Amino acid sequence: MRFAFDDDQLEFAAALKDVLARECTPEVVRAAWDALPSAGSTALWSTLSEMGVVGLLASEAAGGLGLADIDLVSLLFEAGRVAAPVPLVDVAAVAIPTLSEFGTSEQASTVAALADGSRRVALGLLIDRGIIVGAAAAADLLLEADDGLHLVATSGVQVEPLEPLDSVDGSRRLARVTWTPTPDTLLADPTVAAAAALDRAAVGTAAELCGLSRTMLDMTVGYVSERKQFGVPVGSYQALKHRLADALLALEFAQPLVWRAAQTVGDRHPEASVHASMAKAAASDAAGIVAEAALQCHGAIGYTVEYDLHLFLKRTWALQRRVGDAAWHRRRVRRALLG
Amino acid sequence: MRFAFDDDQLEFAAALKDVLARECTPEVVRAAWDALPSAGSTALWSTLSEMGVVGLLASEAAGGLGLADIDLVSLLFEAGRVAAPVPLVDVAAVAIPTLSEFGTSEQASTVAALADGSRRVALGLLIDRGIIVGAAAAADLLLEADDGLHLVATSGVQVEPLEPLDSVDGSRRLARVTWTPTPDTLLADPTVAAAAALDRAAVGTAAELCGLSRTMLDMTVGYVSERKQFGVPVGSYQALKHRLADALLALEFAQPLVWRAAQTVGDRHPEASVHASMAKAAASDAAGIVAEAALQCHGAIGYTVEYDLHLFLKRTWALQRRVGDAAWHRRRVRRALLG
Amino acid sequence: MDLGWSDDESAFRNDVRSWLEANVPAEPLPSGDTAEGFALHLDWEYRLHAEGYSAVSWPTEFGGLGASLWDWLIFEEEYYRSAAPQRVTQNGIFLLAPTIFEFGTDAQRRYYLPRMSSAEDLWCQGWSEPNAGSDLAAITSKASRDEAAGGWRLSGQKTWTTRGAFCTHLFGLFRTDPESERHRGLTYFLVPLDAEGMTVRGFGRLDGDEGFAEVFLDDVFVPDGDSDPARGGTLGDVDQGWGVAMATTTSERGLTLRSPGRFQAAAARLVDLCRERGLDADAVSDLVADAVTRVWIAAEAYSLYTLSDVTGIVEGRSPGAKSSLNKVFWSELDVELHRAALDLLGPEAELDGPWNRGWQFSLSGPIYAGTNEIQRNIVAERVLGLPRVGR
Amino acid sequence: MDLGWSDDESAFRNDVRSWLEANVPAEPLPSGDTAEGFALHLDWEYRLHAEGYSAVSWPTEFGGLGASLWDWLIFEEEYYRSAAPQRVTQNGIFLLAPTIFEFGTDAQRRYYLPRMSSAEDLWCQGWSEPNAGSDLAAITSKASRDEAAGGWRLSGQKTWTTRGAFCTHLFGLFRTDPESERHRGLTYFLVPLDAEGMTVRGFGRLDGDEGFAEVFLDDVFVPDGDSDPARGGTLGDVDQGWGVAMATTTSERGLTLRSPGRFQAAAARLVDLCRERGLDADAVSDLVADAVTRVWIAAEAYSLYTLSDVTGIVEGRSPGAKSSLNKVFWSELDVELHRAALDLLGPEAELDGPWNRGWQFSLSGPIYAGTNEIQRNIVAERVLGLPRVGR
């Protein structure tokens, strides 16, 4: 038994953190709000591909690092910390391992182009009611239908952007796809693939939510330690202290569930789906608690778009209910528990 | 429109409050824990009968005051404030109006003996899963079966006390009754009677819960204003202030729902059942919030039986889930709202 | 207890309902916190005023209908039920006007109130400063005496001024006694935004609207008292502005800003959304449906609580510090209401539609008009009587 | 990351499980906080000790098995899963012993620890006083120097001493420097309850057990240091008791008192109750079932968090102030767990059975071992680094 990241994992995460601090500043996130059609930050995507983050789960033969979900999870946490406007969950955490493990050999052969960053895939699971993020920038779509998971060329389907009713997070361009599933685009093991993709997307999103939460908490601690009212820092008031302590509590006890799920999902553990749901439920709830505490403790300044907090709040609100909200995932746990 | 008690109602409640302050001290409540078989406090019951509280809803012909549910509700609140160990809800709020309105003429003729305090009825609704309070001290039982409400002589059925697994509130003696319903004990309008009895029991219990809450809150405010730690009253800490403010908030916004329900239940308003459920849901939740805040703010001393708080806590925990808990009542509201 | 309405009240309700049905725009107006939207909202204000509906409870001489508090409640219920436009005049009509009624001179009342109800003058509030948010008494904007000109010269900065960029006048506190500290030595000023030395800069709000403004004052002249209302003036006594302002913030927190009709109408829309989405058989929907029910019950409780308050006011009892209970309750109810809506929408919750905008706006409720932390302190200290020592 | 157990660890688990299956009383013992129940619990302690199971992580010379922290976790998991009796020795073994290990002399360790693991000596804690609860530094019980006798004379009153009426020894802080204030000038004392001048009075607890005691000390003699351990003594340096005690309270709040096995076992019993009651088709049950699921997830989270802590400790990293997070989490998890159980029981929740007793006991969790208000202060100040000023 050893429940901690190993030195390699910690070093990789620290290195990524340094890179992101330089290359994914709040200005970069803001810039992604204006990029049309949004591919998020393309420069950042190149960097992440070159570092091996995108292809972490791809085999060495496919140009990847051949590592496991547990190795990726703390990198997704770092990506969440800076609200990185890139599709790491869709591509690195879901598409690459899903195509590698469950795709036809032809489908699996696209993994190399995904790993080197030259090609993207966007994910459309049934649970997200057909809403896809960044479809316009993706060559292929990994789409779930009743018969399982399909890999479909974006050019072959009708993509309807949701403008002007887009995401409140301006770096996310949403679309709905109209298509008719045919057997030739199915993955080799389509239903198992769909289930695994859901679990991986849930765990990856949970990790990003934890990272977002950590940043919102850090920003808030910084702000309330400086901001004075009634002659003292507002962070010296017990009400704010306790609210932030509760926010930390929620986050600290969500994280181990996320790390555990990353391990067992990668291991194809029989309980992996339950673990993934525990992770997403706890991370969604924690992020919601942290976000509201952060906004309340900032007061009016948190309510302005000139201040950076809103970038993290809006990403959080988007991801909280993406790939199943907390109630949906608790229900999945409950069915395993109570039948 | 006028949403307030009138002068007569306020004066009656104030008079009752004075009487209860003298005749229903914590010592009287404690004594009821030892009375076997518990009839609660018989002296107090006589007083309440003489004052007209017990027979408030009975017609003047039956020796009552011929008043309405709205006139009784603030008296039940006062009874809750002192945790009065007497069956006011069963007898005064439910049995008397139910038998008067929906009983056969023979059944209605028992109301005079109920109003003068010489005879008691205990209530057994299906929602309480056959658990009856104070059955041994009651001449008759108002029992719900699938075909509606029955008035049954206690001597004619088998009453099994739940000892040693009695209520945590030692003034409540619980029993289960074994009986076979026969048509001759049915009320004249048995199903309407059962529905009305449930509504009245819910509203009456809600009023007592509000009274209990008010006392727990008052005791706690008194304690934390006196008790010093770290050189200042513990009540000067913001965490305690906010917890007690939240407790007050829950109580203040539950009360109007209870008063409204008392009015509309008495009026046989078409929405009366929904109003009763809103009242019980809000009062059950509020009382739970107040009770936990009270215990936590008292610290260790609240956790001792020498201190009076526990008398109110335990009554609260008993009544919170009596006649339907908050979730049950919200579901009833929801069905009216959403179908 | 009398839960019914009189014949006259019912007739008033019918009149209001009919008028609203005939006049409320079929399509919701664009947000009044943008320039285009604000203009459309102004048109709406003119139509309301023509009917006497812009301030129903005011005397007719000031542009109202002289309606009772009960009629006001009825009006608000119908107004929100009809999904009529937001009131871009609310800072003036609901916050400043009660203060003018209480502290203004006759001349001030006659000058300002009719212009306010007709939306000729549009008021924004100038409470907060960069270092005075929750701590209003930390105000540093100052007013220096100009004895020769018979008035004051104002300098400083105000911020978080809602719709400041679209308004014509500002009300707020300035320090008239340079030696004073905290809540002493402040005076309540009324200032036209086109006065020389005023600069207004709009900036963006979380929900995407440019609803906030910063206002910079550089040696702005304001005459004494009611000597020349068209150029502004002081309200109430010099150096006594704190007491005057507290009357305004009480009304901000209390009845006037958040009428129960607003939450009952919003809860009804939530119930519609819930029905529309359909309740499938699984448990997620049960949880959300329970949340919707909670919100509905809370909106009812808020409405009844207000009826109880209004009964008290009509009979001469003041709600006092209990208005802080109101503010905490409605602001948190509004958050829960929108949370339930987003939960119903699931993955579609992130769309930039009315529910998500409403969610973001609802989150400002616990912040503005005195943060809920401060309101809970007030409840604990002034309603429950807990000791004031400490923070 | 390695989520598996080694062969040795699995073998140890099997041994423990088999022994517990064979030895745990089929019927639950009566509460150990009553006189009769306490005697039966003592018998159980003797049997545990005979197997080396009373303090598995202690060296064998003191009556333990020298087990690793991992084995200790395994033991606790199995212990709670088997529904074995509560540990009436826990104040000694889990609270005092870590302090003796850290601050005691060899003589003290050799004298006290074996007697503790064998349940020959039964320790209760003497922290709280009538005016020193959360504010432990407000202690007024004092120890006066008796140079001639080579020791101290103790006077004062301790209260909220769990199971004090059934114990043989007390540990606690006394003021040795009469001039001192707050946390200076306190010394950590070990005192036999049969010493001359000691009076113990039991009193009733909310859940009906007589579990509390007040302890009165009237000129009780305690010798210096380890000069005569049988008559008690001082632990650590004179006047340095605060630092010594903090080590104990950290362990009270941290890992040792609340092993994850306890909550996982309780959550499993809750799930059983839920299954037993049956899930009828209506929404009430869905709400409760969701609450049960929340509790289950929280128990899992607590377990994983502990595994992470233990990994850190094994690898030489101290959890530090984070143990306050633990305490808040487990105590509130325990409340939610029992709340869900009472909701499942509905009208039967008021019966004086194990779930209602457990509910009442759970409500003491946020109070004892440092109230959760104090723990949240610690989290905010020492983990998040928020400013200490103010309350």
Image (spheres, coloured by chain):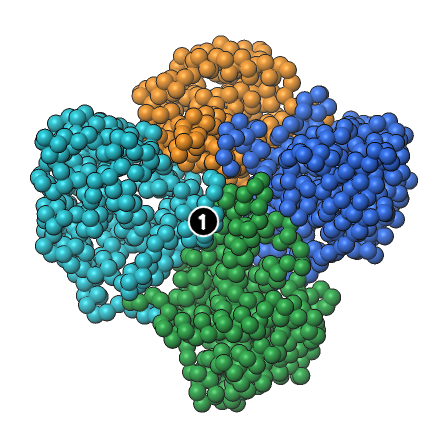
Chain colours: A orange, B green, C cyan, D blue
Can residue C27 be seen? no
Left or right? Give the position of D47 relative to A287: right
| The one of C226 and D217 positioned closer to us in this rendering | D217
SS class of the residue under badge 1?
Answer: helix
Relative to residue C368, is residue A175 depicted above or below?
above
Q: Residue at x 67, y 51 (%)?
A: D361
Relative to residue C97, is residue B272 depicted above or below?
below
Q: Name the kind of residue labelled 1 in the image.
A: Ala
If the image is split into quadrants, where does the N terminus of chain D sit? top right
Q: Which residue is mark 1?
A: C380
Numbered disc total: 1
| The one of D95 and C37 positioned closer to us in this rendering | D95
Q: Residue at x 30, y 38 (%)?
A: C184
Give how far across and how far down residue B169 sits, in percent: 64, 64
Binning the other alpha carbons within 10 Å of mark 1 as few (below 14), some (14 to 19) or many (20 upward) gives many
Residue lying at the far front of the rendered structure: D148
Q: Residue at x 62, y 74 (%)?
A: B40
| The one of B245 and D329 positioned closer to us in this rendering | B245
Relative to residue B17, is residue D272 depicted above or below?
above
Can residue B309 be seen? yes
Q: Which chain is mark 1 on? A: C
Give how far across and how far down residue D362 sits, in percent: 65, 49
Left or right? Give the position of C53 relative to A73: left
Give how far across and how far down residue C343 sits, in percent: 43, 43
Give how far across and how far down residue B112 sits, in percent: 51, 87
Left or right? Give the position of A128 relative to B113: left
| The one of D206 and D165 positioned closer to us in this rendering | D165
Based on the displayed image, in which of its 4 quarters is residue B11 positioned?
A: bottom left
Based on the displayed image, in which of its 4 quarters is residue D190 positioned?
A: top right
Q: Residue at x 58, y 61 (%)?
A: B312
Relative to residue C253, is residue B274 depicted above or below?
below
Based on the displayed image, in which of its 4 quarters is residue C134 positioned?
A: top left
